Each structure stands twice: as C-alpha cells, then as structure tokens.
Amino acid sequence: MAPPLLLLLLASGAAACPLPCVCQNLSESLSTLCAHRGLLFVPPNVDRRTVELRLADNFIQALGPPDFRNMTGLVDLTLSRNAITRIGARAFGDLESLRSLHLDGNRLVELGSGSLRGPINLQHLILSGNQLSRIAPGAFDDFLESLEDLDLSYNNLRQVPWAGIGAMPVLHTLNLDHNVIDTLPPGAFAQLGQLSRLDLTSNRLATLAPDPLFSRGRDAEASPAPLVLSFSGNPLHCNCELLWLRRLARPDDLETCASPAGLAGRYFWAVPEGEFSCEPPLIARHTQRLWVLEGQRATLRCRALGDPAPTMHWVGPDDRLVGNSSRAWAFPNGTLEIGVTGAGDAGGYTCIATNPAGEATARVELRVLALPHGGNTSAEGSRPGPSDIAASARTAAEGEGILESEPAVQVTEVTATSGLVSWGPGRPSDPVWMFQIQYNSSEDETLIYRIVPASSHHFLLKHLVPGADYDLCLLALSPVAGPSDLTATRLLGCAHFSTLPATPLCHALQAHVLGGTLTVAVGGVLVAALLVFTVALLVRGRGAGNGRLPLKLSHVQSQTNGGPSPTPKPHPPRSPPPRPQRSCSLDLGDAGCYGYARRLGGAWARRSHSVHGGLLAAGCRGLGGSAEQLEESVV
C-alpha cells in the first residue's frame, strides 16, 4: 500500500504548483519560482503555504487583493521588471509575515495611502526604476517601526513623505538618487539615528539645510554607525548657506559648485571657506505711498535682491506680522494685496527682506479715502439709493450753506448714450486732491463713481441708457484731512438730466433708396436698347452703301502676246471728291460720331450718380449705419 500512497501525495503536490512555475520544497518551506514565464497576471492556484514567491520578468500589469489572499506565511515577494501600473488598495493586506518586497523596474506612477497596507513587518522595500511622481503621506504607515531599507531611486519624485521617513527609527539605507527633489525640509533626518547610507545623487538640490545627521560622516568614533553621504550631481549654490557642509572636510567626494558665476565648475571641497559668502538684502524698488478709495483693492509691492534670495514679510500699522487671511494675501515675491480696504487698513506698512547675511526694510504709506454717505438714510452707514442721491446731497449742501444761485455743475451735449459734465474752478482757497462724480439712473439702482484729476473741469460720461433720467453730483476730495474724516469730502453741486430716446428707423430713406435703385435700373435698360438699335442701323447702312460704290483699280496693265506694253499716259492730279456728310445718329464707326453714344451713356451715369450721392448725403441718423452700408444697399 505504500507505493500507491506515495504516488497520491506526489500527485497532490504537483497539482498545487502552477503549471508554468517550478515549486521547490526545501527545509519545510515552499518556494514558487515563476520568473521569465510570460505571465500576464499572478497565477490564481499558487499554494497559499508558499514562503518565497518569485514573479520577476513577466508582463503582470495590475495587483489586487485576490492575488495574495490567505498567504500569511509569505516572507519574500519579488515582482521586479514587470509592467505593473496599478496596485489596488490592500493588495498585500494578508501578508503580515512579509519581510522583503521588490517592485523595482515597473511602471508605477503613484502610490496611494492604501496601496502598501498590510505588511506590518516589512523590512526591505525596493521601488526603484519606476515612474513615481507622487507618494501619499500615509503610504508607509504600516511598517514605519520595522523598515530598514528603502530604495526610491530613479523615479520622478519632487517631494517624498518626509514625515513618514523621518519616523523610521531603524532605517539603515535610504536611496533617493536620480529624482527631481529640489528642497529638503530642515530636520528631515534628525530622528534617523541608525541611518548609515544616504544617497541624494543627481537631484536638483541647490542647498542643504544643516542637520546633525551629516556630522556623523566626519567622525567615525562619534557614533557606532557613521553616515555615508552622497550628494554629487546637484546644482549646488556655493554660498554661506553651505559653509557648514564645507567644514565637514570630505576631500574624497567629487561634488562641484554650479553657482555663483565665480565658483561654477569648481570642486566643492577645494573652495576655501572664505569664498562661501552671501550678499545681504537690498530693497530694489517698492511702493512709497498708495491712495485708494474705501472698498477698493490695495496692492503694495516690494522687491529685494540678495544672495540667497531674501524671504519677504510685511508688518502692518499695528506692528503685527501680516499673514494670509480671507481679505489679505502676502505673496513670496513681496506683494501684499488687501482685497477690500477699510478705514482701519490705513497707515504705515513695513516690508522686511531677510536672508542669512542680514535684512533690509522699507516703509509704505497706505491711505484709504472714505466714501461719502448720505445723511437722510435710516440705517447707519448705508449709502443713498438711486432715487435720493441728489436729494440727500442737496440737503447736505443747504445745511452747510454752500448751494449757489447758479448751478456749479452742468451737463451739456447730451445724446442718447453720452453727456458732457462741466464745472467751474471753485474757490481757490480750498485745496482739491481729486474730483468724484456720482450718478445713477431711473433704469438702474446702481450708484456709479468716477474719479477725475484736480486739473480737469469736464468729464464725458459714456455708455448711458437712452431715454433715462439721471441724477448726478460732483464732490471734491481734499487731502488735508484724515482718511476716516468725512469732512474731507466737499459737495460742489448736483445736476439732473435726461438722455435722448433711441431714434427710430427712417422709412423715408428706405423709400428713396428703393426709388433710386429703380431709376438706375430703368435708365440702364433704355441705354442698352438705344445702343442695340443704333448698331443695327449702322450695320444695315454699311451693307447698302457697299453695293453702290464703284470699284477702284490702280496700276492696270494690258496683257499682250509678247509685244511691248504700251506706256500709260500720265493723268493730271485731281482733288478727291467731296465726302458726303453722314448723320452721327446712324454712323457709330466714326470717332467723332461715336461720342454721341458716349455722351448719352455718360448722361445716364451722371444722373444715377447724382441720385446715389443725394441719398448718401441725406442719410438718416436713426439707421445707425455708415456710408459704406448705405452704398451697399443702393447698389
């Protein structure tokens, strides 16, 4: 009975191994080897007791939870050099015993927060040679306490989850080379006490922030695990920010400087410390003072130069640092924007530019001009409505006793969409910084403001509503009072005017145009008929005349039979017979008579042009079209 039982066990073991794979059972551990088998997916019949699974060099494109379900004893999983582009959430959820995961040489672009969940005892994670551009902040959370080797080289990473990497206390090797990392946060490696190798080769780092981790590479006796640091191939900016790294004295490396211009191309460790210098900030230009109306946007600008590039800050009138809020934005380039200004925003602002070499400051004065408010409104601080703007302004003027007998503000040259506002120079003793025009119409309740320089005494209002009533008031803004003082706004006068209605279409001109067109058409037909009739008579007259004309012969000689020909007698010269006069109405072949037909055609042409020109000259304003449009309608 023993041989049949042995065969049965062998048959059951052979069935558990996938057909294209090779299974090895050594030392009570099962290894499934499926490399170079042309697989398009993970074989579904892999023995769940497998300890080592090798699926490298295949064509697997995606991983999901069913692929490794119930494989709790799997320790080593190799998926290198496949075509994996997506890892489903918790695809490795049951691999609690996994120690090594190789995903290098695939086509991963992104790792989500749940892509690597499950292997809580993972020690080696190899993700090099992919196309990773983003790794979610919580992608490594399940194995932060156990990971010892992390390889993210040869990807497209600009940022990595620094918070997660900095919380790996037993991490020994970190490979970040051949990426596009341009900044390292300060203290990113401060907690990595066991880190022995850090590779930052061929990134875009211009500077490195000081970190106690880097000093371990200088003194091997200071720590049981000296650091091997590699950062060549980066565009290092050799200034005072890298002086701390230069003092580590590592002449065995071949890092070079990329800037500034005087140090470009020189070996980093060969540059003397005295040449690692910085330039203090210098305010190149800034807004000196800014005047805005209440409620408008205020933009304060400040530009600074220095090496390294200065960091810009703003301090408000209350001596507090201005930060980003719902109504104020401080940009890194030194621009400060206040979305909706109020009286409390006025005052002096200080622009501060700082870098490791020093700081520079500049002061900007912001003044907010308060808008005038009506005095007869029920709610405090509310603005006059469209129907009472002029009334409230006149009431205030009468209360102050400044309403003059003659109107100080006039609106002339009023059309359907425009009007010219004019006013006098006013009293010379009153200083004026600018004029403000307020107006609204009976068609719209919106109060419109226009700012006019103090040197102007007229303003053309455009884009008005045809056939509407307008109320307008003119105010003078004085710069002598504070921005919150309403007495700085002085009323000069008000006016009421109405725009002209829209002109209707001119139907009479349309009739004239139609009549002119018919006249030109009938005249053209008559001229054509007359020309045809004249040509017909000419052809008939010439045919009859050619039959009556005698045949004229010249140089006629008689033929003889060999005898000499008689010499002709010379004839005395005679004058040609008088040519009969022909009627110009019948003969169009003669140049002189042909002018009659031309004169007749020209007369009709001049008549049509005169009618056409008269129509153009009498264009109707209501049509709203140009002369070219009218000409097209006539033709």
Image (cartoon, helix red, strand yellow):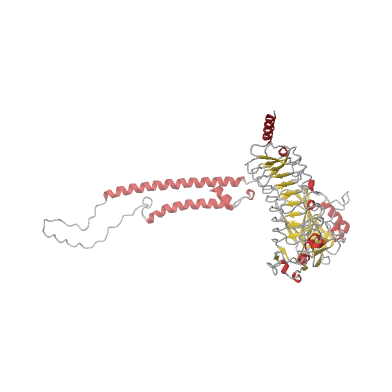
Residue 345 lies in quadrant = bottom right
Q: Is residue 142 visible?
A: yes
Give the total number of marks visible in the rendering.
0
**Place of residue 562 in the rendered image (x, y in percent of width and height, measured from the top left):** 11, 57
Which of these two is toward me, 224 or 424? Answer: 224
- Farthest residue to the top: give it: 1
Taking the spot 75% from the left edge, 69% from the top edge, the residue there is 276
Q: Is residue 158 above or below residue 84?
A: below
Q: Is residue 619 left or right of residue 497?
A: left
Residue 100 percent location from the top left of the image: 74, 47
Residue 406 in picture, x, y percent from top left: 80, 59
407 or 467, which lies in front? 467
- At horizontal 55% and vertical 53% (from top left) the residue drawn is 613
For the N terminus, give its image quadrant.
top right
- Residue 469 drawn at (x, y percent): 76, 49
Q: Is residue 566 left or right of residue 508?
A: left
Q: Nearer the viewer, residue 59 or 592?
A: 59
Q: Nearer the viewer, residue 490 or 15?
A: 15
Look at the image and tell me whether residue 442 can be seen. Answer: no
